[in-house]
Image: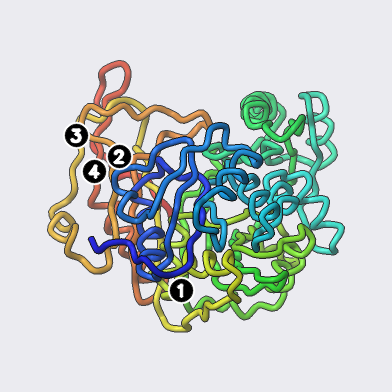
């Protein structure tokens, strides 16, 4: 690998020292190729694969806004911007930028985006449609909310919790079990003061999308649309995402308006955002605003459109204007998350001959990551889903071709799981998304 360039902007990266290489390295590579110098501020040492992309590392105990600000301010060379790719540190990173008078998301906006109840209040007050919901701190309040909204309802921790998706409660019994699990996650994640509770939300039908936006000086540009596939049995877990460079939704003015108004309502100043919406018959309904970029979504946007969101977001943090022009060509990229057919222990893992020859060679199979091997346990996760065993990213000329390739991959990948009682069901294809 080439040496890190000596010239170019210097940015402080908050956190990310032990990030997964599969999902994160392409972001580091984009910054490296753009000549952006990165110094990491973290309480963990950078992983070996990260070091060639960094010009320095500073150990910061506590990772609070105060300790981080002091560490960044004391760096021998003044930094030009502050970036963060970790949800748990995003609010602190925004505070660092505020205190050092650098462009940033804004601490108030970053904090509000983590709190679903605050986000809903601000977005609704701005005139955008949001799902009807109520905040419940105990089961009694959740039961009252469910009765008022009508079953089925969706349960979500008030504070966004990585790895814990929403849960669907179709009746009172499922409300009881779902509330207990969700309330536990809500308590564990209540790091912002006493903001605990569970959001009880009406279930809406319609395509779920994410509007990927870049904001500079309070002015927002819609860059890409991500179509999300969600499974509601028993929880609203993402099954996959798809990005189409020629998606007609990019020209939908109601989506653009909802994204702009939502980000303005939260007070977003500079940075990247993901505005989740449900496309209902009455129009877009804003479900959430997520600060920053998602590793895999960023990769899909790059594969489909060529837009380098990592570099664009970083340059905005350094005070540059938005410099991304989505390419309108027929290119599509999709990721599907793979799950085992049943809980138990993997006794056999086989990739069909029709696909094994193409792994590493097929241009359309961007990556296939399997996290299990024979002998691995696949147990139901806390959200009720059988644990994911990997993911696959494919590209195609259009959505149909992408789906056909995902189907071919799922048919070719066979997983045999031995149940707890020792029985071995027939080998089955892994589950994914359409």
Determine whether label 4 and label 3 are within 8 Å by CB.
yes
Whether residue 14 can be seen here: yes
Nearest to the eye among marks 1 and 4: give it: 1
The residue indicated by pointer 1 is: 307
Taking the spot 60% from the left edge, 65% from the top edge, the residue there is: 211
Taking the spot 51% from the left edge, 31% from the top edge, the residue there is: 384
Q: Is residue 32 above or below residue 202?
A: below
The residue indicated by pointer 3 is: 348
Viewer-closest of 367 and 203: 367
Give the SS element for disc 4: strand
Mark 1 to mark 3 CA distance (whole Å):
40 Å
Determine whether label 3 and label 2 are within 8 Å by CB.
no
Whether residue 167 can be seen here: no
The residue indicated by pointer 4 is: 414
Considering only order in the chain, which callout, 2 or 3, is on the residue closer to the N terminus? 3
- Residue 352 - label: none
Give the SS element for disc 3: strand
- Determine whether, in the image, residue 61 is placed left or right of residue 46: right
């Amino acid at each position: 690998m080439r040496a890190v360039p000596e010239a170019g902007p210097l940015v402080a990266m908050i956190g990310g020292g032990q990030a997964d290489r599969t999902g994160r390295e392409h972001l580091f590579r984009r910054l490296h190729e753009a000549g952006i110098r990165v110094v990491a501020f973290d309480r963990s040492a950078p992983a070996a694969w990260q070091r060639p992309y960094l010009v320095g590392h500073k150990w910061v105990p506590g990772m609070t806004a105060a300790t981080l600000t002091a560490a960044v301010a004391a760096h021998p060379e003044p930094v030009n911007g502050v970036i963060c790719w970790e949800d748990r540190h995003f609010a602190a990173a925004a505070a660092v930028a505020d205190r050092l008078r650098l462009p940033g998301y804004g601490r108030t906006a970053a904090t509000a985006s983590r709190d679903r109840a605050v986000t809903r209040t601000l977005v609704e007050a701005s005139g955008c449609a949001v799902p009807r919901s109520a905040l419940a701190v105990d089961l009694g309040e959740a039961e009252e909310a469910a009765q008022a909204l009508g079953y089925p309802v969706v349960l979500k921790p008030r504070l966004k919790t990585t790895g814990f998706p929403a849960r669907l409660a179709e009746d009172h019994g499922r409300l009881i079990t779902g509330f207990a699990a969700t309330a536990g996650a809500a308590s564990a994640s209540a790091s912002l003061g006493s903001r605990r509770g569970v959001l009880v939300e009406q279930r809406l039908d319609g395509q779920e999308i994410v509007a990927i936006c870049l904001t500079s000086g309070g002015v927002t540009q819609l860059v890409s649309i991500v179509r999300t596939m969600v499974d509601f049995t028993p929880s609203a877990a993402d099954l996959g995402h798809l990005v189409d460079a020629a998606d007609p939704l990019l020209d939908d003015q109601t989506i653009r308006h909802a994204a702009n108004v939502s980000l303005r309502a939260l007070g977003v100043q500079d940075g990247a955002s993901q505005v989740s919406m449900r496309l209902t018959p009455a129009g877009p309904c804003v479900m959430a605003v997520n600060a920053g970029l998602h590793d895999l979504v960023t990769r899909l946007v790059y594969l489909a459109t060529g837009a380098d969101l990592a570099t664009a977001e970083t340059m905005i943090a350094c005070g540059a204007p938005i410099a991304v022009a989505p390419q309108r060509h027929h290119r599509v990229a999709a990721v599907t998350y793979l799950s085992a057919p049943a809980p138990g222990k993997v006794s056999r893992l086989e990739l069909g001959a029709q696909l094994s020859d193409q792994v590493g060679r097929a241009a359309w199979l961007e990556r296939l990551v399997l996290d299990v091997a024979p002998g691995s346990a696949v147990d139901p996760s806390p959200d009720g889903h059988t644990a994911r065993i990997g993911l696959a990213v494919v590209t195609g000329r259009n959505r149909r071709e992408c789906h056909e390739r995902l189907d071919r991959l799922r048919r070719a990948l066979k997983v045999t799981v031995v149940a707890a009682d020792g029985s071995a069901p027939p080998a089955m294809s892994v589950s994914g998304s359409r």
